[in-house]
Amino acid sequence: MTVRFGLLGAGRIGKVHAKAIGSNPQAKLVAVADAFEQAAKDLSVAYGCEIRTIEEIESAGDIDAVIICTPTDTHADLIERFARAGKAIFCEKPIDLDVKRVEECLAVVRQTKATLMVGFNRRFDPHFAAVRKAIDDGAIGDVEMVTITSRDPGAPPAEYITRSGGIFRDMTIHDFDMARFLLGEEPVAVTAHASVLVDKKIGELGDYDSVSVILSTASGKQCVISNSRRATYGYDQRIEVHGSKGMVAAENQRAVSIEIANGDGYTRPPLHDFFMTRYTEAYANEISAFIEGIATGKKAAPSGEDGLVALALAEAALRSVKEGKTITI
């Protein structure tokens, strides 16, 4: 079975997904839509697909599924439109910046019985997936504590900050999903602290660039998340899970994994510079899982409900910062 795709959005993340589709023998990129004509043209030339409007993709008989990579404030409306059009839907996170709007959107998805998968790509990273497998295999006993470090190499531009929904909804939301993925239990309490240490303009826009979060489950399991919009040494992505019988960890990845030892000491190549190269395999595996779900009828995961819970945790973290207290979910 070959799944025929329409891509909505030819920006940075759209290009990442186009590459994943292009490398999958069970996928074909049929058309791309973007408000910026040159962006759509560049991608169509690179992958041999047509340029169409969203309306044309919506009504197309030669497109089975869409990937939504448009600005966040368009996601929920597009999901509803393509659910009613009978297309399978993959949408980048978050579905919306408001929990109530996400709930309304998911009601339409359920009503139409549409396939919806949300883009929490880190679940599909081979290294992080191996950590989950070690937990499932009982290698470290019962999970007790999770530590997630996620730091970007640099802060995004001010224009991005104004539309992102803030660091918790934009950046930490990936870590909220990973925390649930590794803890195996739902967090019931959120304590968060946030500062502006990287760029004062971010603070002037009402956001933060340095945050720490503690999640707790009903049984007492804990997850500590550390985020920063600045890591001078590269894209910092690490996880550690401590259990009753031991520990499993996924270290930072490098484009080349070598180590040089000489009179100057031990040196290794730099980390990946950002998510486009660090998570290349994760994006490819993510699209493969989406295609498999379409072919088998298996419920998509991460689901719209996973997206809703991660957003609820993000909102709780923001409340915790503003109110200076632990928020119970």
Image: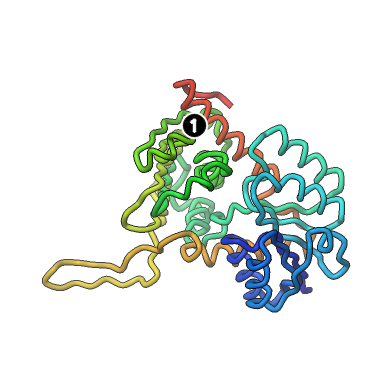
Return the residue nearer the eye: 258 or 7. 7
Q: Residue furthest left?
A: 263
Residue topped by disc 1: 216
Return the residue nearer the eye: 83 or 245. 83
Rendered-image quadrant of the N terminus: bottom right
Q: Kindly identify the residue that appears in the image at 88 percent across and 67 percent down.
A: 61
Rendered-image quadrant of the C terminus: top right
Left or right: 283 as drawn, with respect to 3:
left
Left or right: 312 as drawn, with respect to 66:
left
Where is residue 249 drawn, in percent x and y? 40, 53
Mark 1: few/some/many CA within 10 Å (<14, 14-19, 20+)? many
Query: Where 48 sits versus 264, above or below?
Result: below
Return the residue nearer the eye: 98 or 162. 162
Where is residue 36 drawn, in percent x and y? 66, 62
Helix, strand or loop under label 1: strand
Where is residue 48 drawn, in percent x and y? 70, 78
Q: What's the amino acid at mark 1?
A: Ser
